Amino acid sequence: MAKKVVLAYSGGLDTSVAVRWIREEWGAEVVALAVDVGQAPSADGGDWERIRQRALAAGAVEAEVVDARDELAAGYFGPALRANALYEGKYPLVSALSRPVIARHLVLAARRHGADAVAHGCTGKGNDQVRFEVGVRTLAPDLDVLAPVRVWGLTRDDCIDYAARHDIPITVTREKPYSIDENLVGRAIECGAMEDPWVAPPDDVYELTRDVADAPTERREIVVAFERGTPVALDGRAMGPAELVAAVGAAAGEYGFGRIDMVENRRVGIKSRETYECPGSLALIVAHQDLEAITVERDVMREKARLEGRYAELVYDGLWFSPLREALDAFVESTQRHVTGEVRLRLEPGRCAPVGRRAEAPLYDYALATYEAEDAFRHQDAEGFVRLWGLSTETWSRRQQPFGAQAGEGS
Ligand code: ARG
């Protein structure tokens, strides 16, 4: 059994109980590691220091907080954005992107503290256990990965009793029975009434997006600038990656843009009803796709589109640290060489859509596209091109008469 364990600590009920439980049941020392990925540190408004103190009160030998916001934004959300990664066409991978960041910090902390294992507070039913464990085992095959929640057999009420019995200072709100995971990419909300997929998500699950009915009626436009596929400025103001997602998210969320309600396929074979709000990340993906349309060559665009879904699946399935993700990133990076320019996004209730784009080296050529006098397209080339384009089917029709003896006859 492990002697010293670094636990991914959220400050919530499960991981607070886990600190003490690992100590009592497995006799190991616990180092609590809280990773700031842009979530509110505590549902009750507490700060990171309060979270640290809670871990110590629960029995951790040490408790530390690392700020991984820019790392998540630049190193994980950035590549996913350049890949327009949306799982099952909809979900911008919120939790799936933060888990490898946390896994990496668990390994770093384990090395720092001379620990022989790391632990997480995931249940056995979800994707996050897969992402933590596969991530840690890939980065550090020598470390054990422990999952107390998967084996302890405690209900939520048991956990509340356990915390009370051991003087673990945690206030649990019983009225909101949601399981929430949030970071700067967005928020995921599960459980409660939403476990019935026919029931609309209650209004109180949302925090980053307004109800469309309460959105401003006045339209607004924002301009996002990109350099090689990376967003770098909002309305001409240069910003770091984390700040930028937040600022774009604040603008789009005001208009009620960014809510997702879907049934998705978890890696472990369960279909689950998921509610998300991702105003910033979704708005940036919309803008990025639009800038690609004017800067990326047609065949590259089509091939990239084929790979984007695969990329999202891979990240969702916990394979961030994998040779395929690295190879796909290399491909994506090479497609982004000229994705430099600006996109005008129009915000209106429930919508965020591009209404203008310009680029440093656009492939849009006015002289080729225009119907005005400046038209430089060689119209005479079209006749022979079109005839040869259709020659194969024309010959097929002539020789094999698929449409019958007379044109248009038959099916
Ligand atoms: N279904 C999403 C995913 O697998 C969100 C998971 C959220 N986690 C949570 N503990 N609520 O990425």
Image (cartoon, rainbow, N blue to C red):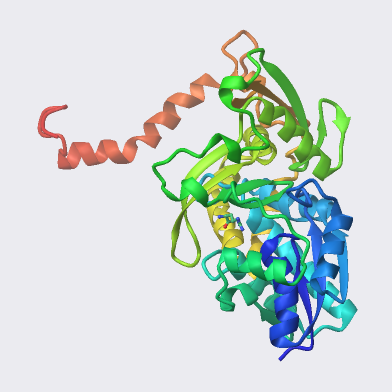
Residue toward you, 37 or 329 = 37
Residue 53 higher or lower than 93, as above or below: below
Q: Position of residue 126 (x, y in %)?
A: 54, 64
Position of 224 compared to 325: left or right?
Answer: right
46 sits left or right of 98 in the view: right
Residue 223 at x, y percent in the picture: 76, 25
Q: Position of residue 14 (x, y in %)?
A: 67, 65
Q: Is residue 51 above or below residue 337?
A: below
Return the residue found at the far bottom: 1
Residue 270 appearing in the image: yes
The quadrant of the rendered image in which ligand 1 is seen is bottom right
Image quadrant in which you'd find residue 298: top right
Q: In which quadrant will I find the N terminus?
A: bottom right
> For residue 11, what is the image quadrant?
bottom right
Question: How many numbered discs, if any?
Answer: 0
Q: Residue furthest front?
A: 165
Residue placed most toward the observer, 101 or 297: 101
**Residue at the top extreme, as displayed:** 373
Q: Nearer the viewer, residue 101 or 409?
A: 101
- Quarter occupied by residue 409: top left
Residue 332 % position (x, y): 67, 52
Which residue is depicted at the point 85% across and 69% down? 56
Residue 226, visible in the rendered structure: no
Please tell me whether residue 365 is drawn above or below residue 171 in the rendered image: above
Q: Which quadrant holds the C terminus?
A: top left
**Residue at position x 75%, y 45% in the image:** 337
